[in-house]
Amino acid sequence: MRKPVIAGNWKMHKNRDEALQFIYSVNMQVPNKEYVDSVVCPQAPLLRDLVKRQGDYLRIGAQNIHEESEGAYTGEVSADLLENLGVGYVIIGHSERRAYYNETDTAVNKKIHQAFRYGITPIVCVGESLETREAGDTDTFVRGQVKKALEGLGSEQVKRIVIAYEPIWAIGTGKTATSDQANDAIGVIRETIETLYDASVSDDTRILYGGSVKRKNIDEIVNMPEIDGALVGGASLSAKDFLYMVDAALKTVS
Ligand code: 13P
């Protein structure tokens, strides 16, 4: 049984007051992390404040790290610092970073290694464009991204990784992949992991769906057999909606 994860990617939203208000309203209400992992990922300057106030069960994640531990990389944030601040998760390879900041598969792979070096759980994003889907190349494309992302990782690391399947055409568009499309693509990711490692590894790896996840579709998504939770953008900005989605995930295990 894989423990579900509901992760909120706040992207470039929420100032400090808004973020603290969110934390205060969800802190006491998120379920025990023995059953569901509840994570929110704010903008980097807020990480310290939120980690200090994260309560017993909510966890705080970053949205990016640099692939080196330190150096002359103006504007970047190191995994070393994140570990130091007590940050538990980091989103790696989000399609917005791949598109706007030229993040390559090689960089994504290095960042994953770097996260593990500092004991931070990577939430690794993969997913195809509309063009790729319409050309019928989704499976090949996603398989390729997963292979490159996992290069050089051991079985124990892959069991601890969280993968998020986020088709680019479903992000922020209100156009959700159907639960079958999401389940199928996630099935392909799981098969890829089985081929690269073995079934004991692919059975343990948690794979989320992301892309226009909201209150109205979360139940259907988390109830699909291959899907272990969601990486949520816009809807995670509302404390009420975030709690609703965490609760939907909890129901699948209780
Ligand atoms: P939306 O939920 O706003 O579509 O964003 C998804 C996403 O990119 C999460 O990382």
Image (spheres, grey):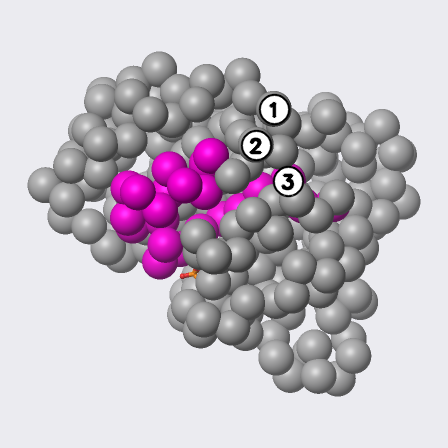
Give the residue pinned by disc 1: 254
For marks 2 and 3, give the one nearer the viewer. 2
Magenta region, residue range: 226-247
Q: Specify whether residue 89 is in view.
A: no
| Quadrant of the picture in which ligand 1 is shown | bottom left
In the rendered structure, which amino acid carries the disc numbered 3? Asp
Q: Position of residue 54 (x, y in %)?
A: 29, 23
**Does the magenta segment cover residue 230?**
yes
Dividing the picture into quadrants, the one containing residue 42 is top left
In the rendered structure, which amino acid carries the disc numbered 2? Lys
Distance between the Cα atoms at labels 2 and 3?
A: 12 Å
Judged from the image, the secondary structure of the residue bearing numbered disc 2 is helix
> Does ligand 1 reach within 8 Å of label 2's beta carbon?
no
**Image vertical order of residue 15 relative to residue 54, above or below:** below
Q: How many other residues sit within 10 Å of disc 1, few (<14), some (14-19) or many (≥20)?
A: few
Q: Nearer the viewer, residue 209 or 50?
A: 209
| For the residues bearing labels 1 and 2, Cβ distance under 8 angstroms | yes
Judged from the image, the secondary structure of the residue bearing numbered disc 3 is loop
**Does the magenta segment cover residue 24?**
no
Give the residue pinned by disc 3: 228
Distance between the Cα atoms at labels 1 and 2?
A: 5 Å
In the rendered structure, which amino acid carries the disc numbered 1? Ser
Residue projecting furthest to the left = 17
Give the residue pinned by disc 2: 251
Q: Nearer the viewer, residue 16 or 151?
A: 16
Q: Earlier in the sequence, mark 2 or mark 3?
A: 3
Q: Earlier in the sequence, mark 3 or mark 1?
A: 3
Distance between the Cα atoms at labels 3 and 1?
A: 14 Å
Q: Position of residue 238 (x, y in %)?
A: 28, 48
